[in-house]
Image: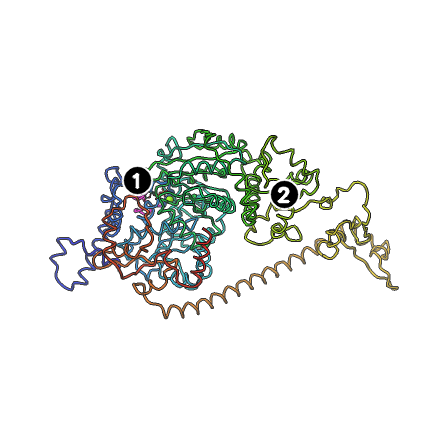
Amino acid sequence: MPAARTGSRVSAKSQKVKGDSKSLKRKRDQEDLQKLQNDVDEFDPKPENTSKFSTLPISKPTASGLEASHFQNLTDVQARAIPLGLKGRDILGAAKTGSGKTLAFLVPVLEKLYRAQWTEYDGLGALIISPTRELAVQIFEVLRKIGRYHTFSAGLVIGGKSLREEAERLGRMNILVCTPGRMLQHLDQTAGFDVDNLQILVLDEADRIMDMGFQSAVDGLVEHLPKSRQTMLFSATQSKKVSDLARLSLKEPEYVAVHEAAAAATPTTLTQHYLVTPLADKMETLYGFIKANLKSKMIVFLSSGKQVRFVYESFRHLQPGIPLLHLHGRQKQVARLEITSRFSAAKNSCLFATDVVARGVDFPAVDWVVQMDCPEDTDTYIHRVGRTARYERNGKAVLFLDPSEEQGMLKRLEQRKVPIYKVNVREKKKLSIQNSIQDMCFKNPDLKYLGQKAFVSYTRSIHLQKDKEIFNLKKLDLDAYAASLGLPGTPQIKFQKGEDIKKLKNAPRAGLSSDSESEFEEDKKKRKKGEVRTKYDRMFERTNQDVLTSHYNKLIGDEGQAANDDDDDDQDFLSVKRVLRGDDLDGETSDGPAPGTKIIEGLGGEEPFVVDSKRREKMLKSKKKMLKFKGKGDKVVFDDEGVAHHPYKIQGEEDFIQDGSAEAQRQKFVESEAVKVKEADIDDKQLAKDKRREKKEKRKAREAMGSEDAMDGMPRLSGADDGEDPLALLASLPMPGEDSGSEAEEERRPKKKAKKWFQDDSDDERQKVKSKKGKGKVIEVAEAPNTLEDYEALAAGLLED
Ligand code: ADP
Ligand code: MG
C-alpha cells in the first residue's frame, strides 16, 4: 500500500502516543500527507527553493528515487514546471531538446497519485502519451527508475503484442505510458477497462501528437477521459494553438517556455553544419563521411524506411569498418527494441533511421547527427539534431542539401533561429563507391529491388513535400540519382496528380522502357563525356530489360498497380510504370481511328465508345466503367401497341400545358425524388449504425466473458505473476522490498544488456546490483523470447540486421 511507505517519517508528537500500532501508523501517514499537501500549497518557487530536488515539497519515495538515480539539481524547465505541476496546474511546457522535460512531468505524476493515496483498486490514475513506441519505452524506463520506491503499478501500451494479452493487465494499472492509436483501441474495445478516475494526462512531444497524423486517435482518446483532470503538454517545439487547447480542454494553462528568449532554438552545446552535395553524390558523400568518423556514434536520418533499408544493406556489403544498425517503423517490435538498446549501449556505431527516432529518444553520447535527406520542416530538423548535445553534452550535426534545396532550407532555418554553417567536403575524402554499388546490384537482385524501391519512395517523398520553396523534383537529376543507387536505369515514375503527367509521358523513355537503339543513344549522350565505362556499365545497358522484368512484374500488376507487398504506400501518387504506350494517352490521337479500331454507337451517351486498345476492350466488361458512356437514361411510356414514347409525345398538348411549364415540372420531379432519397438515406444510416452497435456489443460481451475467465485464474499484482511473460509489453513497477527496492529493481534487468540511459550511473550501484540476484518481479520490456512466435519475431529481427 502506498501509505505504508511514509512510516519512516516519525514526528516527536506521534512517538508519545501508544495503542494499536496499525491505526497509529495510519494516523501518522495521514498527518504526513496533510503536511506534504500544505508544503505544496505554500511552496514559493524562488530560485533558491528550486535548485535542488531535495528542497522541493515531494514525497519520500520520489525523493529517494531521484537520489538513487543520481538526479540532484533541477534543470531550468524542471525548476519552472515541477512546482506548478505539483500545485495541480495545467501546463504547456516548451524547452529545448535534451533539457530534461521527462522529469518535469514524471515527478508531478508520481506526486499527484501519491498524495491521492492511489492504490491498485483505484484504477488508472495517470496516462502518458508518446508519439512513438521507442519514446514510450524510454519514458517508462525513467518512470521505473525514479518511481522505484513507490508501489504503483505501471504499464506500457504500445502494440506489438496481441490486444488481448495487453488487455488482461490493463485493468490494474495505475500509470500507463502509451502510443495514441493503441490506447484508443483498448478504450474502445477492452471490456472492464475504465478510465473515469483519471487524474492526470501528459502528452510528451505534444505538438506531434496533436498534428494531423494522430488527430482522430487523440480526439477519440480524449473523448473517453474525464474532463476534470490535470493536463500537461511538453515539447521542444511547442505550439500554443488555441484549437489544440480546446481539443484537450485545458484549464488556464501555464505557459512554461524557458528558452523563448534564447538566441538559438537548438542547444548551445551543439555545433551545426551543412554541406551542399548533389542528390547523385549523396551516397558517396555519406560513405566518405562515415569512413572519416569510424570512432564515433552517429545517427543518419533518411526520409523513408526504404531509403534506410537500401543504404543500410548496400553499406553493409561495403564494410566501412563501423557497426551498422538500421531502424524504421516497418520492423517487428522485438527487432526495434533490440536495435535501440544495442545502439544505446554502443560506443561506436552508425544507425540509419527514419524519423521514428527523431523525437524525444535519449540515446546516450551520440557524437553526430547526419541528415542525409533534408527534413520536411524546421521542427523535424530541430528534433533530429536534438538526438545529440543532450543535457550539457557536446554534439555535432551535419545536414546534406542538394543545390536546389540550399536556399530554401537556409531561409527556413534562419527564420527559426538555427545557427548553421556551411562546410565543404574535402575532395580527398570523397570515395567513389558507385561502381561497387552497381556491381552489388548486378549480382544481387534483391539489393537492386531495394534500390528501385528507395528511388521511388524518395522521389515520391519529394513530390509530396509541402514546402515547395525547398523541394522541387524537377530540379533534381533523377537519372544520375538512379545510377548512384546502382540501378541500371531510371525507374519510370508516374504522377497521378499534377501538371507533370504530360511531360513525363512525352519524355524520351530512358532506362527501363528503353528498348530501341535510338533511346539507348540518347541515354548515352546524357552521360558525361570522357567517363570511364566499365564492363558492367555495358552489361547493364544490354541486359536492361531482362534484369528488371521479373522484379517489375512483382511491383506492378496487370493494371499497372503496385502489387501489395510491403509497400502499399507507394501507390498513392507515384508508381513504377513499365512502358508508356500511346494508348495510355486518352484523347491524344489526332489522325483519325487507327486500323483495327471498333466504334460502338447507340449506348446512350453523347459520344460513341471507341475501342482502340486492349484496355478499352476490357472496359466493355465492366458495367461501372461503361456507365459514363451510357448517358443518363430517359423516361419512356409504352402505347397500346407496345411502342416506347417520351411521355410528352403521347400526352395531349393541353394536358401538358395544364401541368405547368417543362421547367416547373422538372423542378417538381427533382424535389419529390430528393425527398425520397433523403428518407432512404436516413434509414440506411440508422441501419448501418445499428449494425455497428450490435457488432460492438457482441464483441464487448465476448471480451467480457473472455477476460472474466482470464481474471479468475490470474494471480495478484506481485512477484509470481510478472515472471511468467518476459516479453510482455506491460510491466509493473516493483513493490518495494523490505530493505532496498532499488537493488531489487536493478537486478531484474537482463544481464546481457548493458542498458545505460544515464551517463552518470555510478559503478557502485551496478556493483550492488551484481551482488544481489534472483527474485524477479518486474517484467523487462525486451527480455528473452518466450513463445515460438517470439522466437520467430526475434529471428526475423536479427536476420534483418
Ligand atoms: P528532453 O525531454 O527535454 O529532450 P530528457 O528528459 O530526455 O530531455 O533528458 C535529457 C537527458 O538529461 C537525459 O539523459 C536525462 O537523464 C538527463 N537529465 C534530465 N534531468 C536531469 C537532471 N536534473 N540532472 C541530470 N541529468 C538530467
Ligand atoms: Mg523528451
Q: Is residue 571 magenta?
A: no
- Disc 2 designates what residue? 492
Can you see residue 669?
A: no
Q: Nearer the viewer, residue 219 or 176?
A: 176
- Looking at the rendering, which quadrant does residue 264 occupy? top left
| Left or right of 468, for residue 324 | left
Q: Quadrant of ligand 2?
A: top left
**Element type where label 2 sits in the image:** loop
Rendering coords of residue 400 (x, y %): 48, 35
The span picked out in magenta is 74-89
Q: Check disc 2: other Cα within 10 Å, few if <14, some if 14-19, many if 20+.
A: many
| Left or right of 772, for residue 602 | right
Specify which label sits upstream in the sequence, 1 or 2: 1
Q: Residue at 27% of width from left, 46% of height from top?
A: 761
- Disc 1 designates what residue? 75
404 is higher (above) or lower (below) than 348: above
| Amino acid residing under circle 2 | Gln
Q: Residue at 30% of width from left, 44% of height from top?
A: 759
**Most prominent secondary structure in the magenta stretch?**
helix
Rendering coords of residue 222 (x, y %): 44, 52
Q: Check disc 1: other Cα within 10 Å, few if <14, some if 14-19, many if 20+.
A: some
Q: Would the CB of label 1 be found within 8 Å of ligand 1?
A: yes
